[in-house]
Image (spheres, rainbow, N blue to C red):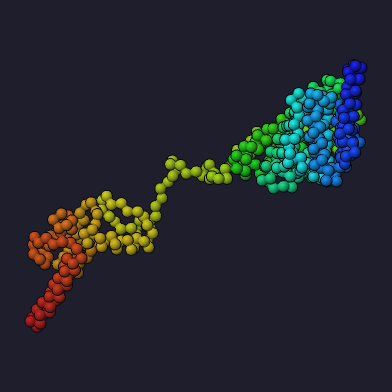
Amino acid sequence: MESIKDHVKRRAMVIAERVELELTVAGTEYAPMERHVFKCTKNNTKAPKEKHVIALHREIGEGDACKTVLKMLARRLKEVAGHQISSASLAAGLKTLAVWHRCINSGDDTFVTLCARYPHLIESPPMNPAGQMYAAYLRELLSSFSASKHAYHRETGFEDTRMRRISNEMVVQEAQLVCNQLRKLAECDLQGGLMDVKTASATQYCINMLILDAMPLFKALSAAIDRLFEFVGTLPRTDAEKMTKLFNNYVKFIDRLTAPAKQADFRPEVAVPLTSFDKKAVREFLEFLKAAEAKTRTENGSPEYFRALADSAVDATGPPREAVETPETRVPTFSMDAAIAAPSYGAGAAKSMEPASTLAGQNLIDLEDDFLGTSTLAQPLPLTMPLGAGNWDPFAPEPTTAGTMGQTTSNGGDFLFDATGAAGGAGQKMPLNSATLSMLYSQSQVNTQMGGMGGGSMGQGMG
């Protein structure tokens, strides 16, 4: 309970501050707005007066005065942090942040867009821990709005939440923004301010403002969770893991928001005079929290089920895990057509499988290289062509009179042929190349013709 002496002292200093304000701004263009800012944030035991807050809303709605109101609120927040100013109290700091919060939630997005460009201005003094938590939430609110260009805390029940109308990719991004905003809101533990009679009204007013934001935020996050159950298994693995953590935070928010919602106070001196904040709205919000908690305990709505869905997600930048080829699962394959078309080489010769069109031309080159003496075969090849015969069969058994090839270095690395039984005489070494083969083939043709002529003459003589 405030003593009479403290009350008189506080009132005297407020009057002195008001006189100083009038001497500073009296007669200026913005004097009315300065008075409204001062009267709704002055150091007393009451909540901000609604008529002064509405006057600021009216100025903000015109558009031109948005920057002026922002400068006044930022300067006022610094004033209540000064040790030489009479308004340097917890109540004045909380009331300034609450009025700033009301201005952010009012009208169109003009003022909140402007504040989102200067979030660093909302900074409470270290001597006011409750004000620091509240200011941290307001900065997160502006950060979320700057990223999504949508104020989820201002959604109403007259239309469906934006979270049900956006794409899956945007749900993943904006659900994290809403989750971060709710986390900062749940961290605002302002219970200590209710113990002091000088700050009780201002603290309760701030709690009501936080509850007013928590209702649409949690409903938007619930809509995002419903959407995630449908497609979390198709997300990249990194996003699926983030959504699993988000769902775990969603379950925790149910308990962390239930206690503040039960602290809503509807007394005229501390209630937020808005249609969205009444006993019916708070009661429906508590029922919504209870239904969300019951859903998380069902089989198809539990964290374990959500985790199982997320585990089925695969990384979009890589193949599925079951399709990865390992040394154990790799099976060698070959083509029978290619094996039949490929020529047969001696031992130690390794040739790669190639298409039939390529092998046809390559085989001719390989055979020519072999006959020209440029072959690189490691083992000698048997000569299967019987020389000296008129009609030889390349697939016939190898005759005993056939010559043999042997590799030597006496002829520059060429193969030498032992022309035993062929033209040239026995024991003659001839290089095995195209010229030798042509000569041998011509000789065989001559021998064939001579054999035919001999047979004809013999027949004539016998006749």
- Residue at 70% x, 35% y: name it: 180
Residue closest to the eye, 269 or 7 = 7
Which residue is drawn at the image coordinates 92% and 30% (left, top)?
268
Q: x, y percentage for residue 265? A: 87, 28
Residue 440 image position (x, y, % from top left): 16, 67
Q: Is residue 311 left or right of residue 427?
A: right
- Regarding residue 284, the answer to whether it shows in the image is no
In the picture shown, does residue 194 fall above or below 405? above
Query: Is 162 located above or below residue 453 in the figure?
Result: above
Which of these two is toward me, 160 or 78?
A: 78
Q: Indicate the position of residue 377 as horizontal and vertical percent values.
A: 24, 53
> In percent of the image, x 83 and y 23: which residue is there?
194
User: In terms of image quadrants, where is residue 341?
Assistant: bottom left
Task: Report the number of discs.
Answer: 0
**Where in the figure is residue 16, as x and y percent of width and height?**
89, 26
Asked whether the viewer can see residue 252, the reply is: yes
Screen quadrant of the C terminus: bottom left
Task: Locate residue 415 relative to residue 326 in the image: left or right.
Answer: left
Q: Residue at x 83, y 20 (%)?
A: 195
Foreground residue, 307 or 242? Answer: 242
Q: Quadrant of residue 36?
A: top right
The quadrant holding residue 24 is top right
